[in-house]
Amino acid sequence: MSDLLDRLRGRGWRMTAQRRVVAEVLDGDHIHLTADEVLARATTRLPEISRATVYNTLGELVSLGEVTEVATDGRAKRYDPNAHRPHHHLVCSGCGTIRDVHPGGDPLADLPASERFGFTVSEAEVTYRGLCPDCARA
């Protein structure tokens, strides 16, 4: 389970009912929802929440560094609450399902000096692609 709610409380983030619901929807492992999916889930908990509030709250969470935006293959941006836990993503090429993965090794160390072209590399984003079990059976 992600610790998004605890992190936000620790920051003293003003927890309105609307913000709390958005954070609750995003809290957990392997959560990679689009803004529209966040809105749909939030409205089941708080029917009066508006689209603008959800989008603004997501933007604020990204600006705070508490949620990261994940974009794969031109699909809608997804929001990942595990911003403080280093991980990579495993993406299904069929349905777009995303899972967090934690393989061993250091992707920065795997980039040879001859391939850095003088860059001082500070981070790496690795995306593994394939078919999930459901799409592989189809």
Image (tube, grey):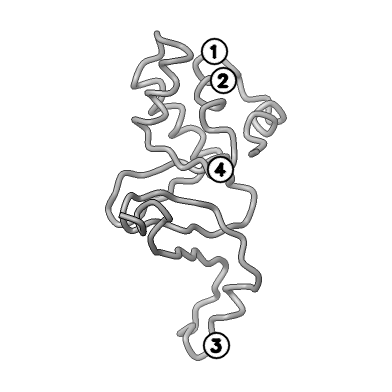
**What is the residue that sits farthest to the top in this orientation?**
48
**Which quarter of the rendered picture does the C terminus lie within?**
bottom left
Spatial separation of the CA atoms under disc 2 and disc 4? 17 Å
Spatial separation of the CA atoms under disc 1 and disc 3? 50 Å
**Which label's residue is closer to the chain start, 3 or 4?**
4
Q: Mark 2 against mark 4, which lies toward the viewer?
A: 2
Above or below residue 81? Residue 98 is below
Nearer-the-camera pick, 131 or 113: 131
Q: Mark 4 against mark 1, which lies toward the viewer?
A: 1
Q: Name which residue lies at 57% across and 68% down.
A: 122
Mark 1 surroundings: few (<14), some (14-19) or many (≥20) residues within 10 A: few
Tell me the residue that label 3 is attached to: 113
Q: Name which residue lies at 64% across and 29% down.
A: 5
Q: Locate residue 131: give its quadrant.
A: bottom left
Above or below residue 95? Residue 109 is below
Image spot of residue 13 (x, y percent): 62, 25
Q: Amino acid at mark 4?
A: Gly
**Which quarter of the rendered picture does the N terminus lie within?**
top right
Q: Secondary structure at mark 3?
A: helix
**Which label's residue is closer to the chain start, 2 or 4?**
2
Q: Amino acid at mark 3?
A: Ala
Q: Name which residue lies at 36% across and 44% down.
A: 77
Rendered image: mark on residue 65: 4
Mark 2 surroundings: few (<14), some (14-19) or many (≥20) residues within 10 A: some
**Which label's residue is closer to the chain start, 3 or 2?**
2
Nearer-the-camera pick, 132 or 80: 132
Q: Locate residue 107: give its quadrant.
A: bottom right
Tell me the residue that label 1 is attached to: 17
Q: Name which residue lies at 43% across and 34% down.
A: 59
Rendered image: mark on residue 20: 2
